[in-house]
Structures are given as structure tokens and as C-alpha cells.
Image: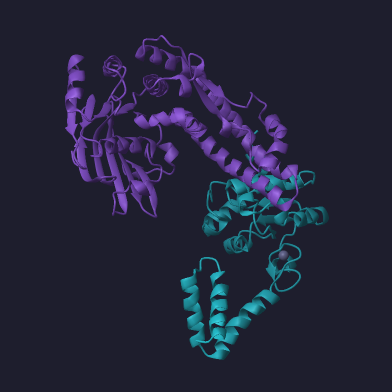
Amino acid sequence: MDINSNRLIEAAVTEFGQLPGIGRKTALRFVLYLLKQKPEDVEQFGSTFIRLRNEIKYCINCNNISEKHLCEICSNTKRDRTVVCVVEDIRDVFAIENTNQFNGVYHVLGGIINPMEGIGPKDINVENLVVRVGQDEIKEIIMALSATMEGDTTVFYIFKRLKDFDIKFTTIARGVSVGDDLEYADEVTLGRSILHRIPYENTLVK
Amino acid sequence: MNIKNLHLLNFKNYAAIDLYFDEGINCFVGNNGEGKTNLLDAIYYLSMCKSYFNFIDSQNVKHGEHFFLIKGTIHDHDKEDEIYCGFKINQGKVFKKNGKEYQRLSDHIGSFPCVMISPTDINLVWQGSDDRRKLIDSIISQFDGEYLDNLIQYNKALAQRNAQLKRFAANRYFDAVELELWDDIIVPLGNKIYESRLAFLAEFVPVFNNYYKFLSDAKETVGIEYETNLKPNEYRQILNEAIEKDRALQYTSVGIHKDDLSFTINEYQLKKQGSQGQQKSFLIAIKLAQFEYIKNKKGIKPILLLDDVFDKLDQSRVSRLMTLVSEDTFGQIFVTDTHQERIENIFNEIKVKVRIFPVKNGAV
Ligand SMILES: [Zn+2]
């Protein structure tokens, strides 16, 4: 094999190897598989990801994925814009949408505060939420973050940031997804926990 | 409370073994390296959900195997419970009581208390403050489940606070609000832990002093003191005062994770001034006080595990110790020794019945 081919294979293995959960061995298998396919199929494969990255944008309002400025949920006039459910990432949006129990809109933080993983309050999308609460006709914020110390800390931080606004601040009923990500809570319990949300002040231990 | 039988599979040097014990004194005798101590450790495991000697569970699996199992029948008044502990490499451990799995190990710890006295206890004198904090924590945890929960939460929040301090340094900024998020968790938990330790030592130290007097001829005075940079209700203030220092160090320099105990003999450090025999008596007195403390708090006599205590103790201290533990205040006891004759003589002299288990190469 000449040096150039070697280099191309090595570069492709490195790219696959950067995906979560993929080691070098698996990456090499993928590369060898792609080499055996027709050139037009591989072109299609590659362009799918290029389009994915270029064409999917984040909703300027809620940070959900979207093809336009505003996502489908934010631009749907039947949704109740006075109730905002705050979640960690878009997987939680999918999970809650699947319950069919929530007719409000979302705010996607894109993470929770976790210094050990390099995420501080400024690395998640809180500023935008404060702006939204100040501008829109929001009456209630529902916090739907995982019941971990990091999730709780993030809820507390947002609560402090929003405490001067005249809004209802609630959390989904706990004990439903203790220790689990929302993603894993089954649809029935998740739906019920959104219906039976509780005022956040009641959960604070003095 | 006593353990009636013990069943082991692939635990340390035991392939498979089934043992039935007396309610009183049980002795494992045999040469070093035959596996006497491993039997004590298996009983300790059932009590504390971990080895006394090696916290890495996978290293307690018999060489070449991929799991171990410890099962014991615990008898208390007219009740019998079967405690099961299974560990599989790469899968972790499972604890069950009468077939029902525990959700949290902290729910089990303390329900079947035991106290181990071992030559490795000398680490309490020689090693860093970690070992001494673990001693306090393991005693309090045996009767106060909330204490253990608080400690686990505290350590998680502390790790985040330290990570935040590192982030400040790496990204060259500082924001008090970001640190306070973790202080808000650390302060109430730290206060509770501090108060528990304070209250515990106030009760514990006098009991310890009594036992030391009993074991020695009481010529020397001994002491245990709580060394802490904390004061009641000033946790937040103390954290705040240390902020500049913590930012420079990139970790939290004050708090209950820095607490220590100082051991003294005639007001000097035990480490420097105590003889080997005095150090050993000091440590045994701590463990006997631990026994009495747990007994009073829980109303259960813990199981006493005595590993190789006869070495380096003179004859008079040994017979005093054995007379003491044979009394009614103590319950079931397990002893290891290398000399069957020595053990038999000691207990003959004080007219106490013992059951001898000869141990040889992973078999009894
Ligand atoms: Zn949107």
C-alpha cells in the first residue's frame, strides 16, 4: 500500500474513533466496510451528515433543534406559550412529547451544571431563559431535570436567577425518575409527573 | 446476635466452604497464610459490605475465578436472617437479606454490627488523617444511617466544588455565585457531620479511657482529641475566609474532610512516645470502646473479630483482655492464632469454653 492510501485510511479511522463509544478496532471495521461500497453510496452517506450539520439549526427561542429560526413547537399557535418546561437536552423533549401530556413550550439548556465535566452555569443556556421570562407572557416555569445533585443544583441556580419575576416555579414530581435520566422514565410515569408537578418552594429544605 | 453459619464460594483463598459456629468463642488456628484472617474478613464483609483489608472487591475474588459469594445466617433472639453478598467482576456487588435485594448498601450497614481488631490497625497511628476519619465514620455509620448518606452527598458536592476551583484557575476568572452553588450543599451537610462527630467523641473518649486503664496498669494517661478547623455554626464563614487560599490551592482547604484525631500518651504524641505494647493497647482500647458504644446505641452486642491479637501483648494483658471479652457484656467472638496450645491454655486458665477450627490451605 502506498503512503497516501495509508494516510487516508488512518484519517478515516481517526474520524470514526471520535464518536462516543467507538474504539479503534470498530472504527477500522467501519472504514473497511465503506471502502467496499459503491462510490455513490458512500457519497450519499457523507453528504447526509454534512446536510445534517449544516441544515439543522437551533431554535432561537427555545434551543430545540429546528430547520427554521423557530422550531415546530414554538411556531405552533395551539401550544400554550405561558407554560415553559425546562429540560437538559433534546432527548428530554422527545421523551416528554411522547407522553402527549404537555401542551406548553420548552426551553433546552443543553446541559446541566457539572464542574467535574467542565460545565459551569455560563456554559448552559440560562441567559436566554431569563430574557424569555422578561419578554414573553410566561406564567409558569416547570423544571424537568434529572433528580441528581447536579440536576438539583441547576434547578436551584435557575430558581435564584428567576426569583424576582412574578411567575410560578414548579418541578416535576420527584421519586418518579430518581437517579435516572428523564429519557429512561417510562411514558406513563413521566406524563403523570408533569401533570402532578409541585411548587418548587415546597421542596426546599430550610 | 450471632452468626450461625458461613458459606463461601471463591472468596480469597477459599474455593467452597461451609462452617457452623458456636454462640460463644470460636478460634481459627493455623500457620500464617493458610486463610484464618480471610474467614474473619468474610464475616466483616457481611456486616460492612466491604473487606476490612482490601477495598477493591475484584481483588477479593479467588485467583482465576470471576465471582465470589458470601452467605451467612444471622441469629438474633428468635429471629434468623440470611444475608447474601455476591460479587461479579465487571458487574459489581449485590446484597440481599432473606432473598430481597437492598436498594442501598447503607440500608444494610449497621443491622448486623461487628468490630474487628487487627494488626493493621497500627495504620491508625502511623498513617495520615484519612484512616482516622474512616474510623470515626465507620463507627457512627453503624448506628446512624443518615450520617453515611450525608457523608456521601458531602463528598460529591466537595468534588464539584474542587472541580469548580480548578475551572476558575484554568479559565482565569472567578465568580463567587458559581462556588456558592456547592457551598449551599456543603454547609448544611458539613455542619451536621461536624456536630455528629463532636457528639460522638464526647461520649466515646471516656469509654476509651476506661478500657485503656483496664488493659494497662494505668500508669500512663492517654487521650484522643478532635482536631478540626471548624466551629459550631460558622461553617460558611470559615469557607468564605479560606476562599483566597482555596483559589490558589485549587481545592477546598477547610471542612470536615480535613478533620483529624490526635492520639496522646502522657500528653505526648502516641506515634513518637508510645512503646509497641502501649500503641497496641491504645488501639485495642479504641476497638473495645467502639464495641461498647455500638452496643449501647443499638442494643445489640456486635460480633467481635480478633485477628492475631496475642502477638506483642504480654501475658498479663492477654489474659486480662480474654477475661474481659469472655464476660457477659460481650457476645460472639472469633479469634485467630498461630498456636493452638497457646489459645487452649489461655482459655483453660480463665475457664472458658472455646471451639477450635484448625485452618489449613483454604480448608477448615
Ligand atoms: Zn423552539
Q: Is residue A39 above or below residue B340?
A: below
Is B75 in front, or is B125?
A: B125
Chain letter tied to cyan? A
* View quadrant of ligand 1: bottom right
The reply to whether residue B146 is visible in this rendering is no
- Residue found at x 22% / y 29%: B27
For the N terminus of chain B, the quadrant is top left
User: Residue B235 at x, y = what percent?
Assistant: 66, 29
- Residue found at x 47% / y 73%: A26
User: Residue A44 at x, y = what percent?
Assistant: 59, 85
User: Residue A174 at x, y = what percent?
Assistant: 57, 46
Q: Answer left or right for A71 relative to B162.
A: right
Q: Quadrant of residue B74?
A: top left
From this viewpoint, which residue is outermost toward the right?
A135
For the C terminus of chain B, the quadrant is top left
Q: How is the image coloured?
A: by chain
Q: Quadrant of residue B311?
A: top left
- Residue found at x 29% / y 45%: B12
Q: Quadrant of residue B363?
A: top left
- Residue found at x 37% / y 38%: B53
Chain letter tied to purple? B
User: Residue B153 at x, y = what percent?
Assistant: 55, 40
